[in-house]
Amino acid sequence: MSDTPVTLTKEAKEFLIKSVKEEGKTAVKLSVVFGTDSQGVPRFKYELQTVDGPDEELDLGDGVTLIVDGNALPVLRGTSVEFKQQKDENGNVVQQGFIFDNPNVPAMGGGCSGCPSNAGGGCSTGGCSSE
């Protein structure tokens, strides 16, 4: 791939590699579902799924590939993906998820699952929706 459409933080890569390996797969696919809310405001839902087939590939290392849905590539280009965990005072994970910082999506405010929001995103385990 000549120019990387999506970048991932170290934490996001590590979590995806672990998840893909645990499921016995070789790749994770990132796609976007487009829609509108009841007031006609555009909404985007980010989906991450473990798979075994390519569209646009990004090697994460350790034998795991991120596959970017070819249909969503124009909207995803330039997106940064971060993985965050919130722990309690005993070090137990109480919340975790991905944060999508997408320069192609207007800021919509709010996030999902209580995580901080960036432009057009928020987080939850396994994906995100700005709804």
Image: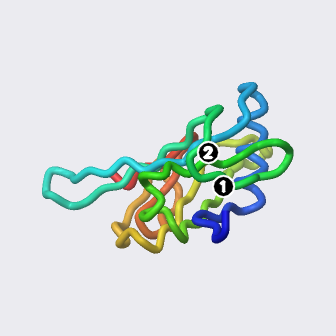
Report the amino acid beneath label 1.
Phe
Q: What is the secondary structure assignment of the residue under circle 1?
A: strand
Pointer 2 residue: 95
Q: Give the distance between the C-alpha atoms of the residues marked 1 and 2, in whole angstroms.
A: 11 Å
Q: Residue at x 42, y 52 (%)?
A: 71
Please report whichever mark, 1 or 2, sits nearer to the chain's N-terminal start.
Answer: 1
Between marks 1 and 2 in the image, the one whose residue lies nearer the viewer: 1
Residue 73 drawn at (x, y percent): 48, 59
Name the outermost residue toward the front: 2
Residue 50, compared with residue 88, is above or below; it is: above
Pointer 1 residue: 83
Packing grade of label 2 (10 A; few <14, some 14-19, many >=20) is: some
Front one among 2 and 120: 2
Q: Is 107 on the left-hand or right-hand side of 62?
A: left
Q: Residue at x 68, y 51 (%)?
A: 85
Q: Residue at x 13, y 57 (%)?
A: 39
Q: What is the secondary structure assignment of the residue under circle 2?
A: strand
Q: Is 14 on the left-hand or right-hand side of 129?
A: right
